[in-house]
Image (cartoon, coloured by chain):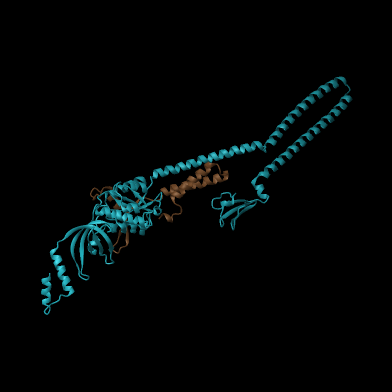
Amino acid sequence: MAGQLEFGLSRKRERVALTVTQLVRVVRETLETQIDEYWVSGEVSNARRAPSNHLYFTLKDARSAINVVMFNTAARRLQFRLEDGMRVVMRGRVSLYETRGALQFYAEEVEPRGLGALQLAFEQLRERLKQEGLFDAALKRPLPLLPRTVGIVTALGSAALRDMMRLLFDRFPNLQVIIAPSAVQGAGAAAGIVRALEDLNHDGRAEVIIVGRGGGSLEDLWPFNEEIVARAIRRSRIPVVSAVGHEIDYTIADFAADLRAPTPSAAAQLTVPDKADLRRRIDQLHGAMATALRAALAAQRRQVAHLGSRMRDPHAPIRDSRQRLDEAAAALARACAAQSASRRALLRQLATRLTSPLAIGAATGLRRNAVRTLQERLWRALRSRRDAVRARLNSDMQRLDAVSPLRVLDRGYAVVTRRLDAAVVTDVRQVEVDDEIGVRLANGRLLARILTKSQDR
Amino acid sequence: MADNDVERFEDQLAELEAIVGRIDSGELSLEEAIGAFERGVGLVRALNQKLDEFDRRVEVLTRGAGGELRRSPSGAMTDAFDDGADDDRDE
């Protein structure tokens, strides 16, 4: 070392200085030719992505550290997100960053240690979107009970599509189905799914969308784990049912969807009701409603009968009077018969006693007068009886009239009904300001609007 | 979309269920019960109508050369779902 220095100093006069650039280049070339590509393991720190999409971080272990750069082309292939503290293995070469003369590792590939890269990417994305609130239960929209039009995003000609179509039409034969086809695996599949979702939204007729595919490897299902698909599902104005793979497969799409179906077939069943079931339910309600109304009518009839037993039947006085009239008539007839019989007997008696034609004539005249008097008394009795009955009937009618609702209206009261459903309003809480109400008066109806309302007590 | 419907099926079904409950409760006057029943019968009719409203149809949405949406008519496409022995199964 000392010799070299002396040698250098002794050549002071003729010395040729390298520029910094030249020095750095020499070092760089030495490094690049002498040091091979390596796999290096360590812990990530200070990871950051530049606007250029290059990825910078420091890889360290207990004793040392080295700056690492991963250019955007390599960084794009990274399926997971590099985070501080993560233990990774990276492949690449060491070289010199000439601008700063700094030693740097140029990484081509980074893999997480422990979990596989896809698995890690899945966990990370799920955690990130969850933090963001994309999976919030509050965002989940209810599916329509009876979607008349169903949108499907999947691959044309796939077994999954065939299974879904068969089940959908089994359950609801007159269903409308709109298929927005998309590849569901491989490069570009995620973008295709996003476009298909957008197309269905743009078309706007579907009331619910099923997006999915049959089972496959984690790589096959991967498009459904991509962020753009999750966001497109959330962005859809139409509720989305995810149906990816088998029961055990969970994808990011499942978490983002309004409803996760374990399989495409299950999605068909969850999305569209069985038409026969619905028909039965409607019939059942129709029947129950009729039964309930019959019960209500019967109850009402019992109540009327009960009230009737307390209130005299308006026909009863007439029936009573008629009976009494009949009795009176019978009594009268009996009386007449008895009287004429007795008169005939008397006549015979007199006839046997009075042999004088004159005497007989006088006696007959006397009796004629007596019969006439009796008849008149009878008619008077009948008339007065009839008048009494009539008077009682009138008073009964008036009593009936007084309890009739129409009579109540006569006294200035009104019946108020809601225009909406014709329900009788008996409580101010039944109506709101601006509601329209019907008002029934004794001689007509009004349509009115509520300006204000207030409640007593 | 469902939003444009006058009344949704599930809303009408729920109203029908409520009507049955109300008539059954005995809280209605006879006049109200009859009115509710009439409304219920109207709902039954509307619900049954909704079940039969549409005909079965299958369409495929595709993009034209200019990026515009195209709807292929049903017939040809539905056939593709009936056999399909030649498709690439992705299960």
Horizontally, residue B35 falls left or right of residue A333, namely: left
Seen as rendered, the residue at the extreme top is: A352
Colour-to-chain, brown: B
Quadrant of residue A8 within the rendered picture: bottom left
Name the residue nearer the viewer: A208 or A278.
Answer: A208
Residue A154 position, x and y percent, is: 29, 53
Name the residue nearer the viewer: A391 or A78.
Answer: A78
- Which image quarter is the N terminus of chain A in? bottom left
Tell me, yes or no, if residue A181 can be seen here: no
Quadrant of residue A281 within the rendered picture: top left
Q: Is residue A347 above or below residue A422?
A: above
Horizontally, residue A368 falls left or right of residue A294, namely: right
Residue B73 position, x and y percent, is: 32, 55
Residue at (46%, 50%) from the top-left corner?
B11
Residue A344 position, x and y percent, is: 81, 23
Horizontally, residue B45 falls left or right of residue A97, namely: right
Tell me, yes or no, if residue A437 can be seen here: yes
Name the residue nearer the viewer: A3 or B89.
Answer: A3
Chain A's colour is cyan
- Number of marks drawn: 0
Seen as rendered, the residue at the extreme bottom is: A13
Q: Is residue A43 above or below residue A355?
A: below
Residue at (25%, 62%) from the top-left corner?
A58
Residue B6 position, x and y percent, is: 46, 54
Quadrant of residue A56 within the rendered picture: bottom left
Name the residue nearer the viewer: A236 or A273.
Answer: A236
